[in-house]
Image (cartoon, rainbow, N blue to C red):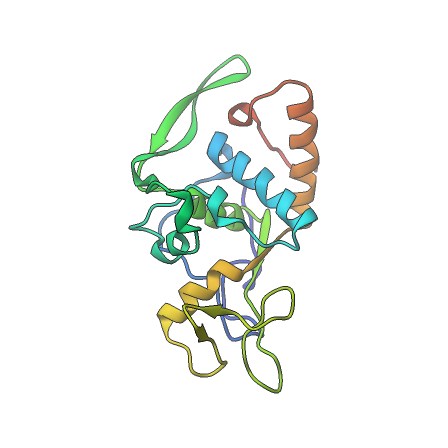
Amino acid sequence: MTSHPSPAQAGAPAASGLRWRRASEREPVPVELFGKDHWSTFAYVETRATDHRGVLDHDRMRCSAARHPMMMQAKRPQLGHVDAARFATRLKGAATGTRFAIVDLADHDDYDCLDDLIDAGLLTVRMPVAQEVTRLYLDVKGQPIVIDDQAFRQGSLTGMDELMLGAYATWGLTALGREAAGRLRDFKAGGGRFHDFVFCPAG
């Protein structure tokens, strides 16, 4: 499927002055190859968009500390998280009937899956916005974002600051994403596995 995400979806600078930063520029995984990890991440984002204003719980995300160190730091340290760098992303392989073999993609975690889902036109991402008067960046509850006793002010950010603020991005589904989510729920309700879900847009 060929998709054409908008500049905002693709992580271009938005009105907030911030942009969602990718770990690296790499060829996106096409939707036809999405397997368990892409579709389970997509389903998780839908629940967060519905029930938690689109904010992710990073403790639930498979994260490579080398690829996404700021997201690793966003996890709660008391939970003793394991670096997921050794866990490959599972892609679709050869089909046998309606089931698919697994092909491992190394050096790829759930945040890379998010980037692929954006490129497929299924997800949107919105970075935090600064308060007009104080110019401090706010979370979804309207409170200044503070990390390690540091607040973040518009116009004085480094690239590292922008990466840290990515943990407070809000996620949503596009119209195409809502179509995919409905079909995925029906597929799972019928006993299907995430890995075997195939999405072909209507029309």
At a point 53% along the width and 51% down the height, the residue shown is 118
Residue 107, compared with residue 135, is above or below; it is above
Report the quarter where the C terminus lies.
top right
Give the image location of residue 43, x and y in percent. 60, 38
Give the image location of residue 56, x and y in percent. 55, 51
Residue 12, compared with residue 180, is above or below; it is below
Image-quadrant location for residue 143: bottom right
Residue 195, compared with residue 203, is above or below; it is above
Image-quadrant location for residue 140: bottom right
At a point 51% along the width and 26% down the height, the residue shown is 195
| Residue 24 seen in render | no
At a point 49% along the width and 30% down the height, the residue shown is 36
Please, which residue is most extreme toward the top here?
97
Please, which residue is most extreme toward the bottom here?
133
At a point 65% along the width and 50% down the height, the residue shown is 49
Report the quarter where the N terminus lies.
top right
What count of labels does the image hold? 0
| Residue 19 seen in render | yes
Give the image location of residue 90, x and y in percent. 41, 30
Q: Nearer the viewer, residue 146 or 71?
A: 146
Give the image location of residue 192, x and y in percent. 60, 20
> In this rendering, would 187 be left or right of 26?
right
Image-quadrant location for residue 159: bottom left
Q: Nearer the viewer, residue 73 or 68?
A: 73
